């Protein structure tokens, strides 16, 4: 079987999605499943939808196009502010996008008019993560300008937490977001349909029993894909952590120690002498490296220790003599490792436990699905 590869258990992704959806729906919050760490893989997206996600969210337009070409017709929201160079494509394949710049909203509006459609706008407000977001005191004016602009419709307000700063959302900040939404409605008039309070890092708050206010949507990726709390890294109760497994192949197995130099007085003729390692520790080299994944984000099987990695090699130490050249080893990945591995061109993706899905030839056009999440 080809290596390196990622084995994906779609049943576990469906289960994780169903678990999150069930818990959040009981709190009045729907789930928008984020597929960016899976590079918009259609089978993974479909497993999330089968699990009850209300729609999908993506950060890269290329991934959205991949989903559309595979026949995925559900609402897809672009969660990274669109690039000006892509506005025509955005309004054709995405029902809505998250925005922070009026110049971009104006360009989206013009593109939507050209394509005879109306594009949904969700304004991102800065709540302390210090990545993207409109300052709270500017939110009302931005919202009013979007409301007055033909070609776009103000559909929501969102916030982000624990991505750049690492700070988890607090009950006070979530309450402040609800207040901001009420103020925008009072200033601009239209009802705000979607209040997206954040991502997987919001789960402890959302499931903590306190009032959720106006928050009715969360963008969930890591918790579904890996079954963990992004802040602590702990497994979420009732969720699978091993829906994704990275498989790499051994290309060398030897006992080595640091090679000292002989004849150091004459560097021109210096020779390297390998000193045999008298311990029982073996060094395994795998055909995978930094170009393929975040090597520091891999979890080794018991009895194996990470030594280091270069662009194309991963070195692991072990006292297990059973592995030989051509043997495979299975690794679990954190979010960073998963995201890079799924996008690596030399890693194959193998899925199992898929459910039947309509053929792209018979699937409906995205324009038939105008609900926004």
Image: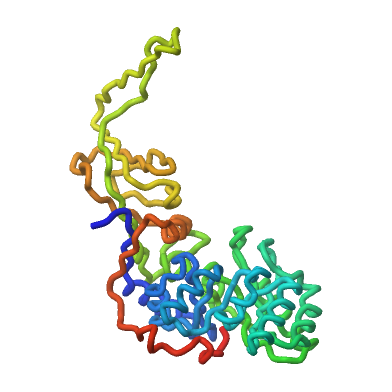
Task: Please report the residue visible at 22 percent of the width from the left and 46 percent of the height from the top.
Answer: 326
- The vertical placement of 168 against 363, above or below, is above
Q: Quadrant of residue 237?
A: bottom left
Task: Please report the residue visible at 48 percent of the width from the left and 56 percent of the height from the top.
Answer: 336
Q: Quadrant of residue 224?
A: bottom left
Give the x, y percent position of residue 313: 37, 42
Task: Please report the residue visible at 31 percent of the width from the left and 40 percent of the height from the top.
Answer: 285
- The vertical placement of 248 against 132, above or below, is above
- Give left or right: position of 38 versus 124: left
Q: What is the total number of numbered labels drawn onto the structure image?
A: 0
Q: Is 314 or 186 nearer to us in this picture?
A: 314
Give the x, y percent position of residue 273: 32, 18
- Give left or right: position of 327 versus 177: left
Q: Is 305 or 359 nearer to us in this picture?
A: 359
- Give left or right: position of 226 versus 205: left
Q: Quadrant of residue 141?
A: bottom right
């Amino acid at each position: 079987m080809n290596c390196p590869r990622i084995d994906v258990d779609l049943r576990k992704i469906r289960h994780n999605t169903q678990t999150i959806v069930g818990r959040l729906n009981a709190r009045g919050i729907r789930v928008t499943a984020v597929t960016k760490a899976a590079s918009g893989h259609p089978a993974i997206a479909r497993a999330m939808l089968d699990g009850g996600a209300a729609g999908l969210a993506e950060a890269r337009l290329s991934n959205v196009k991949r989903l559309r070409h595979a026949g995925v017709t559900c609402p897809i929201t672009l969660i990274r502010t669109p690039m000006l160079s892509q506005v025509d494509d955005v309004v054709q394949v995405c029902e809505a996008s998250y925005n922070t710049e009026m110049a971009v909203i104006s360009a989206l509006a013009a593109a939507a008019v050209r394509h005879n459609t109306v594009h949904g706008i969700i304004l991102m407000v800065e709540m302390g993560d210090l990545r993207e977001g409109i300052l709270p005191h500017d939110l009302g004016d931005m919202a009013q300008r979007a409301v007055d602009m033909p070609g776009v419709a103000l559909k929501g307000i969102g916030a982000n937490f624990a991505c750049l700063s690492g700070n988890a959302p607090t009950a006070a900040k979530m309450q402040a977001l609800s207040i901001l939404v009420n103020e925008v409605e009072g200033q601009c008039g239209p009802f705000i349909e979607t209040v997206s309070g954040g991502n997987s890092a919001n789960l402890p708050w959302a499931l903590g029993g306190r009032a959720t206010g106006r928050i009715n949507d969360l963008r969930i990726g890591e918790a579904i894909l890996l079954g963990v709390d992004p802040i602590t890294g702990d497994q979420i109760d009732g969720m699978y952590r091993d829906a994704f497994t990275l498989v790499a192949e051994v290309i060398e197995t030897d006992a080595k120690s640091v090679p000292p130099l002989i004849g150091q007085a004459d560097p021109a003729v210096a020779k390297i002498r390998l000193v045999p390692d008298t311990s029982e520790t073996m060094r395994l080299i795998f055909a995978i490296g930094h170009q393929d994944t975040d090597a520091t984000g891999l979890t080794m099987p018991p009895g194996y220790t990470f030594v280091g990695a270069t662009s194309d090699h991963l070195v692991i130490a072990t006292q297990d003599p059973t592995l030989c050249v051509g043997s495979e080893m299975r690794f679990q990945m954190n979010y960073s490792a998963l995201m890079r591995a799924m996008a690596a061109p030399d890693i194959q993706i193998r899925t199992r436990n898929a459910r039947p899905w309509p053929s792209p030839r018979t699937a409906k056009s995205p324009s038939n699905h105008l609900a926004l999440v």
